[in-house]
């Protein structure tokens, strides 16, 4: 066994021991285990769903992080996932920094991008620590290196304002979902606008990326592009090489492909992630909702890290307005995130389906403790829509209970279903 593999196995062993001994959820799970408690195998751990983590979040949090001084280092990450089930994951901010190391090395080696370079990012929401910030047109961080925008409003006027602001800022690189990059490219073409002169790299994340879409973005902005697969539980999981293969960051995450309850290689199955860096809230064998395969191939790029082929994930989807304009479905995720914060994080599930260019159906479920809050959540959601064309659409909400028999069916549906042929 080579030294690199030995180090990976040691990291895995350490996080499994830590999870089993430091968190209430795994302590209870292994309470009847006989024999030594200083050696665990990944296969001994149960599979986790987002719903389990959502329901029992505090039981996954390590004991020392529930008191001072370590509680001061807690950072919360939020995501609505592929099917619209919100999940909140705590990180030790020091671990979160460590989880970015491999990704920064990737940026530097492939694209000569460092933390000193100026960047523009598009996010679902802005946070100050763990508290969501009031929506603002833009936000420049303290050192003036990161200019960020929220995706809550991507109306034609605001998108053009974003493009003008980005050109004035003249970033070295940008980080954004493919759907937003395509919207920007279309607006630039319509206005005969050139990309920022200093732009050298675009990092695409948050949605599945196909070769045709990446080529369109690369040609529109005249820069190199990279594809990064990120989860809230493990941070950067994989990034694309020069041959388009997603290579896993082995120091950050262990990836399993589960088919019929068993771990497989070179076959398609459900993707499960184990974070190797998150000691505050270690999540072992977490279901992502994505599907793919781990490939045993010799990549021409020379990397030895495993290759992940992503077959199903969050799609690059668009809402189609009455005028024919296409709006990134990231707007819906942003609106849902701001809504969830305002209604005490009561959402258990939210999904959307576009019926036609005038009509969107939504299914909303709240957590059992918030029974009766459904109408308030839908009201707040509608109140937060700023795009004039989206505001004029008919939004039809129906309410469900996560514990109903139909709940499992709802969980299996995508967060957003666009018009047929609208992606």
Image (tube, rainbow, N blue to C red):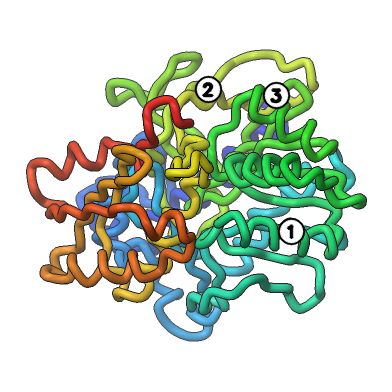
Q: Name the spot of residue 312 as percent of width and height, x first.
A: 44, 28
- Local SS, label 1: strand
Q: Inspect this view and state whether residue 374 appears.
A: yes
Give the residue at x 45% y 40%.
320
Residue beneath disc 1: 120
Residue drawn 77% across and 42% down?
Answer: 106
Q: Mark 2 points at which residue?
A: 294
Apparent side of residue 41 relative to residue 375 in the rendered image (left or right) = right
| Furthest-bottom residue in this view | 68
* Closer to viewer: mark 1 or mark 2: 1
Residue in view at x 81 percent, y 67 percent: 145
User: Depth check: 175 or 377 in front?
Assistant: 377
Give the vertical position of 307 relative to 399 (above or below).
Answer: above
Query: Residue 47, located in which quarter of the rendered image?
Result: top left
What's the residue at 46%, 60% (across, down)? 388
Q: Do the residues labelled 3 and 1 touch (CB within 8 Å)?
A: no
> Are discs 1 and 2 less than 8 Å apart at CB?
no
């Amino acid at each position: 066994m080579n030294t690199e593999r030995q180090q990976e196995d040691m990291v895995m062993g350490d996080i499994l021991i830590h999870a089993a001994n430091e968190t209430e959820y795994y302590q209870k799970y292994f309470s009847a285990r006989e024999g030594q408690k200083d050696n665990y195998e990944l296969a001994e751990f149960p599979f986790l769903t987002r719903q389990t983590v959502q329901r029992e979040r505090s039981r996954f949090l390590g004991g020392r992080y529930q008191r001072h001084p370590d509680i001061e280092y807690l950072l919360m990450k939020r995501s609505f996932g592929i099917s619209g089930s919100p999940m909140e994951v705590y990180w030790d901010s020091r671990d979160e920094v460590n989880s970015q190391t491999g990704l920064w090395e990737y940026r530097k080696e492939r694209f000569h991008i460092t933390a000193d370079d100026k960047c523009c990012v598009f996010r679902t929401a802005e946070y100050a620590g763990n508290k969501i910030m009031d929506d603002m047109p833009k936000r420049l961080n303290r050192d003036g290196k990161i200019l960020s925008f929220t995706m809550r409003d991507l109306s034609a006027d605001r998108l053009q304002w974003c493009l003008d602001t980005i050109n004035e800022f003249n970033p070295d690189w940008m980080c954004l979902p493919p759907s937003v990059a395509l919207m920007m490219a279309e607006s630039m073409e319509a206005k005969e606008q050139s990309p920022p002169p200093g732009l050298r790299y675009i990092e695409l994340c948050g949605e599945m990326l196909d070769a045709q879409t990446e080529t369109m973005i690369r040609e529109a902005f005249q820069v190199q592009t990279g594809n990064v697969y990120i989860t809230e539980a493990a941070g950067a999981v994989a990034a694309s090489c020069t041959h388009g293969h997603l290579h896993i960051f082995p120091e950050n995450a262990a990836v399993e492909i589960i088919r019929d309850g068993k771990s497989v290689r070179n076959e398609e199955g459900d993707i499960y992630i184990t974070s190797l860096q998150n000691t505050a809230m270690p999540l072992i064998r977490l279901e992502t909702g994505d599907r793919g395969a781990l490939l045993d191939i010799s990549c021409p790029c020379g990397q030895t890290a495993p290759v992940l082929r992503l077959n199903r994930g969050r799609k690059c989807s668009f809402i189609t307005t009455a005028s024919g304009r296409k709006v990134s479905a990231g707007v819906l995720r942003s609106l849902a995130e701001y809504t969830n914060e305002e209604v005490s994080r009561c959402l258990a599930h939210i999904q959307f389906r576009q019926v036609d260019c005038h009509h969107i159906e939504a299914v909303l479920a709240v957590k059992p403790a918030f029974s009766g809050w459904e109408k308030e959540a839908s009201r707040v959601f509608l109140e937060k829509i700023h795009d004039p064309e989206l505001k004029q659409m008919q939004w039809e909400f129906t309410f469900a209970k996560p514990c109903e028999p139909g709940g499992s069916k709802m969980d299996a549906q995508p967060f957003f279903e666009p018009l047929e042929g609208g992606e």
